[in-house]
Image (cartoon, rainbow, N blue to C red):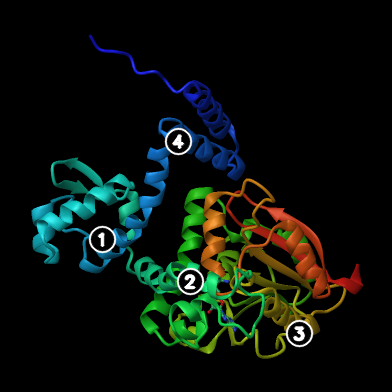
Amino acid sequence: MAVAMPRESNIDTVFQRLVDSYNTFSQAPNGSPKAKAQLQSAAKELIAATQAPYEAALAFAMQNALFPCFIAAGDCGILSQWPKVTMTAEELAEKTGAERRLIARLMRVLVGAGVFNELGEELYSHNQLSTTLSKPSLLSVTKFASPAVARLPEYLAATSYRNPGYSTEVSTPFQFGNNTPLGFYQALAANDNVRKGFDDQMKAHVAMERAKFQTGFASMFDFEGEVGPLIKSPEDVALVDVGGSQGHVLEDVRKHLPGFKGRLILEELPETLQSITVPEGIEAVPYNFLESEQPIKGAACYLLRQIFLNWSDARGHQILRNTLPAMKRGYSRLLIMEPVPPPAAAPMAAAMLDIQMMQMGGGLRTEKQWRAFLDDAGFEVRNFWPSNSNQTVIEAVPKAQV
Ligand SMILES: C[S@@+](CC[C@H](N)C(=O)[O-])C[C@H]1O[C@@H](n2cnc3c(N)ncnc32)[C@H](O)[C@@H]1O
C-alpha cells in the first residue's frame, strides 16, 4: 500500500501567497513592477518550499554549470536561428559540428533553465527565451562582460573586500578580470563587433519597453508639460541626451511627442557616432563627458540615461562637474534615468545588474544614495518619477536655484 508523503507544513501557506500575489498582479494597472516582483518572489518561495534544505543548497551551488552551458551553446551555434521549427540532437549536431551526445547534455541543462522546449527524447524547439538569447549582440556582450564577473571573488580578496570604485587609483574589476589597463568603454571601443552589439542592446530596450509595458521613454517623464513651456524658439535646445548611444531615446521623444518643440541633441563618444545612423531630426555632437565641460550651454534638459550606474561616485562627480557650468540657473534641469532599487526587497534583476556594474567600479544607487551623491556635487533632487518599467527618472537642479 502506498504511504502518503508527509507534506511540508508551509506549502499550503506559500501556495496561498502565490495565488494572492497572482490576483494582485492580474488586477494591477499596466503590469505594476511591485506586483510583478511580489508574484515572482512568491513563485520562488513555492519552489523553495518543495525542496529539502540540502537539496536546495545543492541546486543553488550547482548553478555554476548553467552559464558555461549557455556560452558553449552560443559559441558552437546551438543558440542561433534554426532552419526548422523543431530539431533533434542529431540535426543540431549536423548543423553545428558538435557531438550529438554533448548536445543532449547541454540541452538538458538549458531546457531545465527554461531555455528551449523539450518535446520528446532529444527533440527540441525554440521558445521566447532561447530566441532572445540567440541574438548575436546579446551573446557577444555577455561574453565580453563575463571574465570580470567570474573573477570578482579574486578581485575582492585582493582589494581586502573594499567596495569596488572606492578609489580611482585602483584597477576596476573589469581591468583586473581581463588583465588590461583599458577601462570597460575603452576596451569596447577597441572591439568594433562587440561595441556594435552593445549599442544594439541599448537600442533594443526601447522596443522592449514599448512592447512589454506599453510605455516608452517619452512617457516616463512629462516632457510636454514640464519642458514644453520652456521652449520659446525653434533654436532653443530642449534635450541633450548625454551618452545617448544611437539616439533611441530622442527618437522615441520625436516620434511619440510630435508637438514637442526645440532641438534634440545626441552626444556620444566619436567612435560610437561614426558607426551609427543618427535618427532624422536629431543633431549629433561628439563629446567625452569625463574629459571636458558640456559644450551645449543652456539646454532645458540634460538627460543621462543609464550613465551613472557605470561609474564610481568619484567619476560620476566628474561628469556632474562637467555638466554644471553649462546649466542655466532657474531653467535647465538634469534628468537621470536608471533603475533605483528600493532600500529593501530589491528585485533580483536589479541586484544582478548592480553586480554587473560593479565590474566598472559603478553600481545602482538607492533613493537615499542618489540624494547624497547629487547633493555632494551641488545638485538638489526635485523629484523621483517612478515608471512601470524598471527605470526611474530622477529630476535634479543646481542647488542655488532652489
Ligand atoms: C549603458 S550605455 C547607455 C546608453 C543610452 N544612454 C541608453 O540609455 O540607452 C552608456 C553609454 O555611455 C557612453 N559613454 C561611455 N563613456 C563615455 C564618455 N566618456 N563620454 C561620453 N559617452 C560615454 C557609451 O558609449 C554608451 O553608449
Q: Nearer the viewer, residue 79 or 12?
A: 12
- Ligand 1 location (quadrant): bottom right
Amino acid marked by disc 1 = Leu
Mark 2 close to ligand 1, CB under 8 Å: no
- For marks 4 and 2, give the CA distance: 30 Å
Up the image or down, 377 lies above or below 114; here it is below
Amino acid marked by disc 3 = Lys
- Residue at 41% x, 40% y is 56
- For marks 3 and 4, give the CA distance: 55 Å
Q: Earlier in the sequence, mark 3 or mark 2?
A: 2
- Residue at 65% x, 84% y is 289
Q: Nearer the viewer, residue 2 or 335?
A: 2
Q: Nearer the viewer, residue 36 or 369?
A: 369
Q: Which disc, if any, is residue 71?
A: none
| Tag 2 residue | 154
Q: Earlier in the sequence, mark 4 or mark 2?
A: 4
| Tag 3 residue | 297
